[in-house]
Image: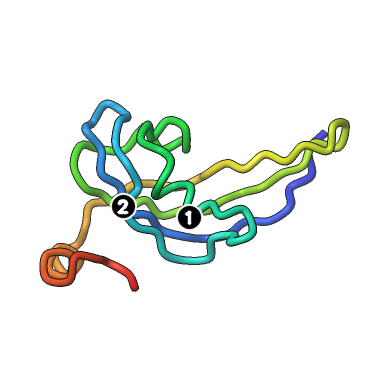
Amino acid sequence: MNNELKTSPFEALVACDGGGNGCVLEVAGTVDEGYGLAVWMQEEVNHLGDLGLDEAPRGLSVWTGIIQESQQYSTGDYETYLKGTFRPLTSAEWSLLSSVGKLWS
């Protein structure tokens, strides 16, 4: 039996080769700093499947969704997983990315 603990909405700028390989370039939103998930996503992972983001389209896209955590009562283990969708960058986002190099501060 699982206990759903919390959800945190956020967005991620994702670069992908269309085959599940790529990286998270930037994150924005409410990311649980206690687990350092934002840092882990940006610095440690180059296979998007490890994050559940292997459906990313080729190129740059924005993933919008939630981080959901649950706890297994029988073991006390925690599991973190992502639920969301990808969308193309808007023209304003492309402009910001090309001029500043970031989407979010």
In what quadrant of the picture does the N terminus appear?
top right
Which residue sits furthest top?
19
SS at badge 1: helix
Please determine whether, in this image, residue 17 is positioned above or below residue 43: above
Q: Compared to 77, does 103 lie above or below?
A: below
Please name the residue that numbered disc 2 is placed on: 25
Q: Amino acid at mark 1?
A: Ala
Residue lying at the far front of the rendered structure: 43
Q: Is residue 104 above or below residue 21?
A: below
Query: Image point 57% across, 41% down: which residue?
Result: 81
Residue in the picture at 21% in, 48% down: 60
The type of residue carrying mark 2 is Leu
> Seen in the image, is 33 located left or right of residue 93?
right
* Front position in the image: 43 or 25: 43
| Image quadrant where one finds the C terminus | bottom left
Residue located beneath label 1 in the image: 38
